[in-house]
Image: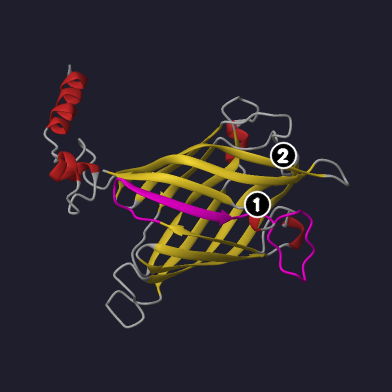
């Protein structure tokens, strides 16, 4: 009965939405539009996006041969805040192309849990898992949990919080984020053979929101033990895009996360600008 009442109240609220409500810039969230705070969770507690993605994956098929696999499909992100800035983040990937070039280790799910505090001069910490978690059962979910990262980072606004000549508009900001990651156990790229334990990575990330939510970003990585650095581990990553946190906004991003090496370091995998991931997503927040 309670479920029926909730569903009825949701559609009753939706039926009162006018065209003026929908195009009102003050309505930043679904809750604003429906004049509802989303049940017991409250405002700004649920957010996410859905849309499409494309990436080219170059991997070693044999000792002398590389293969290109063009991956594309649908993507969805969901974030739920359950206490202050503590939240669960889920990232789903659904492939639309299937062929014999598809690597078996591609993931369908990434998940994170932790305190992600975006405020100036604040710490974030938690656990992140980017292992090959697959819905077909080809990988052991519990085993993969041991191969995620524990992290702590610090967030700092380089341009400050007040208006100043360096800001082109209210969205302009340079976010500086030093961080440390610890991985209890790491494996080969296929997630099958254990290669070592206690991997520690020091890093420094920065995002420059230039104007009107358009940004560029980059990060540097240092591995405290050279033997723990795998062929797919980068010296640096980079990306750019447009991100507007409000509901009903279309965002896009490009990110290049794997095997970028400085010229003086050996490059064991093929990777260039074409190996980045493109996303086009519709964002929502309640």
Residue 77, quarter of picture: top left
Outermost residue, top side: 1
Question: Could you tell me residue 126's position as x and y percent?
Answer: 46, 51
For residue 150: magenta?
Answer: no
Viewer-proximal residue, 12 or 155?
12
- Residue in view at x 68 percent, y 60 percent: 260
Res 275 label: 1
> What are the residue bounds of the magenta stretch?
243-271
Reading the image, the residue beneath label 2 is 190
Task: Where is residue 11? Give x, y as percent.
Answer: 18, 27
On the image, the x and y values in percent for residue 200 come to 63, 59
How many residues crowd mark 2 within 10 Å: few (<14), some (14–19), many (20+)?
few
Q: Is residue 156 left or right of residue 53?
A: left
In the rendered image, residue 265 lying in the magenta stretch gets the answer: yes
Relative height, residue 130 to residue 208 (above, below): above
Toward the right, the furthest residue is 64
Along the line of sight, the residue nearer the viewer: 191 or 27: 27
Give the number of marks: 2
The main secondary structure of the magenta stretch is loop
Give me the residue at 20% from left, 24% from top: 7
């Amino acid at each position: 009965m309670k479920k029926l009442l909730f569903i009825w109240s949701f559609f009753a609220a939706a039926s009162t939405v006018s065209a003026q409500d929908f195009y009102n810039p003050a309505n930043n969230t679904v809750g604003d539009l429906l004049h509802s705070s989303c049940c017991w969770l409250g405002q700004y507690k649920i957010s996410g996006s859905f849309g499409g993605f494309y990436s080219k994956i170059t991997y070693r098929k044999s000792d002398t041969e590389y293969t290109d696999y063009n991956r594309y499909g649908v993507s969805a992100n969901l974030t739920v805040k359950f206490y202050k800035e503590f939240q669960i983040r889920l990232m789903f990937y659904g492939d639309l192309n299937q062929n014999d070039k598809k690597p078996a280790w591609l993931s369908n799910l990434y998940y994170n849990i932790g305190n992600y505090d975006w405020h100036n001069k604040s710490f974030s910490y938690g656990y992140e898992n980017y292992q090959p978690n697959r819905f077909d059962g080809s990988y052991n979910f519990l085993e993969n949990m041991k191969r995620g990262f524990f992290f702590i980072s610090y967030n700092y606004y380089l341009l400050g919080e007040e208006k100043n000549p360096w800001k082109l508009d209210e969205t302009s900001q340079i976010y500086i984020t030093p961080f440390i990651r610890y991985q209890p156990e790491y494996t080969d790229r296929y997630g099958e053979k254990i290669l070592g334990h206690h991997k520690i990575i020091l890093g420094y990330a920065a995002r420059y929101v230039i104007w009107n939510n358009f940004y560029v970003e980059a990060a540097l990585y240092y591995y405290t033990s050279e033997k723990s650095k795998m062929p797919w581990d980068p010296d640096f990553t980079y990306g750019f895009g447009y991100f507007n946190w409000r509901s009903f906004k279309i965002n896009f991003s490009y990110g290049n996360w794997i095997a970028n090496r400085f010229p003086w370091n050996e490059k064991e995998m093929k990777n260039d600008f074409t190996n980045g991931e493109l996303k086009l997503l519709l964002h929502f927040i309640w």
